[in-house]
Image (tube, helix red, strand yellow):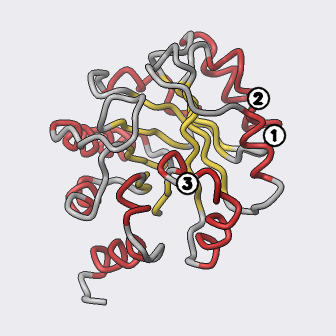
Amino acid sequence: MICPSILSADFSLLKETFQEMEKAGIEVIHFDVMDNHFVPNLTFGHKFVSDLRKHSALFFDVHLMIHKPEVHFRHYLEAGADLIVIHYEAVDPSQIRKVSEEIRKKGKKFGISIKPATPVNVLLPFLEYLDLILIMTVEPGFGGQKLIEPCVEKVAELKKMIHDSSLKIILQVDGGVDKDNLERIYHRGADWFVVGSAFFKEPDFTFFQKLLKRIQTNVTI
């Protein structure tokens, strides 16, 4: 699944952009919520998500790069998020199960993200509470960064961990994903790909979906 990050879109044209993405067959939109506390940048809050929810039936993937997400996640759940992803480094670990249960009880999905320096094995105690794991392949906080190559190997490591657990957990990658490294990340085991600046540089919103299909089928489109 290709998940465009709207952080790289033109905010003045978001309503029209969403319509274009729907026509192009995009199913998941990624929201990068930053608080200028956990990460050195400030983006938008839950009202932004709520306002866009009125204009789209797409799946809203809300990535909370914020301090103490266990305190704030409900605002985004009420705003219309379909998936809420929090950072392992920002949350009180004793609250992870509680947050997961509350989100899932509402019929929504829950995920955890880890920064480049965080080892994947910290997630072992929490796998049963997760619908998705997001591996950051750049330091969170800014769009347009270059992928940190060693992080790609963490994808394969985590894929094995998920397989060994016999659980169905989506493995998502975010950070510097572009047309030159998508195939490499796919073959390491990623399921969902957050694409930001590279996605919006292409004039055709179907470009990355066609590229992924070609990689999956090994057939030229």
Identify the residue position indicated by label 3 in the image: 10
Identify the residue position indicated by label 1 in the image: 106
* Dots 1, 3 in contact, CB < 8 A: no
Q: Residue at x 65, y 64 (%)?
A: 18
Question: Which of 8/216 is in front?
Answer: 8
Residue, far front:
12
Q: Residues within 10 Å of mark 1 (few under 14, many from 20)?
A: few
SS type, badge 2: helix
SS type, badge 3: loop
Q: Is residue 155 left or right of residue 206?
A: left
SS type, badge 1: loop
* Marked residue nearer the N-terminal end (1 or 3): 3
For the residue marked with disc 3, what is the amino acid? Answer: Asp
What quarter of the picture does the C terminus occupy?
bottom left
Asked which quadrant contains residue 200, the reply is bottom left
Q: Which mark is residue 102?
A: 2
* Marked residue nearer the N-terminal end (2 or 3): 3
Q: Residue at x 75, y 51 (%)?
A: 52
Residue 161, percent from left and from top: 33, 38
Q: Residues within 10 Å of mark 2 (few under 14, many from 20)?
A: some
Q: Is residue 144 left or right of residue 87?
A: left
How far separated are the C-alphas under marks 2 and 3? 33 Å
Q: Residues within 10 Å of mark 3 (few under 14, many from 20)?
A: few
